[in-house]
Image (cartoon, rainbow, N blue to C red):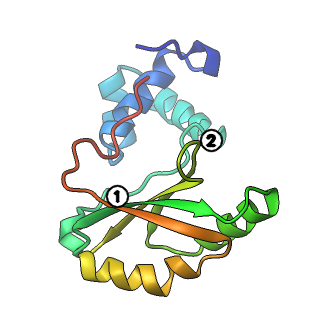
Amino acid sequence: MKDSSSAGLDNTDVNILRALQKDGRLSNADLAQTINVSPATCHRRTQQLIETNVIEGVRAHVNPEAVDLNSVVMVGVVLDRSTPESFSNFEQAIKKLTIVLSCYLVAGEFDYLLKIRVKDMQSFNKLHSEKLLGLPEVRQLRTYFVMKEVIDNALLPF
């Protein structure tokens, strides 16, 4: 276990976070029983974690195959220029594309790495030509189709 004390978290906080990462649907009573504290203490501590943005939200983890989004595509984006304005223009535009699951500013061969889920290669081809190529400041896109997801959306290791 990593030392969580530098983040101001004690063992109760860490236990709440671990339990909720595994099952965000736990009722307060079940969570309290799981971490061995009173329901009142559990509720107060959980609310504090929410108010301090340690817990940013709770949402359902949807099975991609159930909603016909079977293919993962990673896209490396190279911008025309490396200026604050170019980065800002690209970031504002990419935030509007709901099909993009993740967007990371990276060091290396390209400027940004995108994670996208689509139905199939044909769907990606349409997205590529109609949306991605038209993003501001983009010079080049490098596409990588994921053949197998080994680890996806793992729990935070604390």
Residue at 39 percent across and 39 percent down: it is 28
Q: Is residue 38 visible?
A: no
Residue 145 location (% of width, % of height): 28, 61
Residue 129 vs 51, above or below: the answer is: below
Within-10-Å neighbours for mark 2: few <14, some 14–19, many 20+? few
The disc labelled 2 sits on which kind of residue? Asn
Q: Nearer the viewer, residue 120 or 76?
A: 76
N-term-proximal mark, 1 vs 2:
2
All told, the count of numbered labels is 2
Within-10-Å neighbours for mark 1: few <14, some 14–19, many 20+? few
Q: In which quadrant of the rendered image does the C terminus lie?
A: top left
Q: Which residue is mark 2?
A: 53
Residue 59 vs 124, above or below: the answer is: above
Q: Which residue is mark 1?
A: 60
Q: Quick one: SS at disc 2?
A: loop
Residue at 64 percent across and 63 percent down: it is 79
The disc labelled 1 sits on which kind of residue? Ala
Q: Quick one: SS at disc 1?
A: loop
Residue at 44 percent across and 84 percent down: it is 129
Query: Contact (CB < 8 A) between labels 1 and 2?
Result: no
Q: Nearer the viewer, residue 37 or 95?
A: 95
Question: In the rendered view, does 43 fall on the left or right side of 60?
Answer: right
Q: Nearer the viewer, residue 158 or 11?
A: 158
Residue 58 location (% of width, % of height): 45, 52
Question: In the rendered view, does 144 fall on the left or right side of 120?
Answer: right
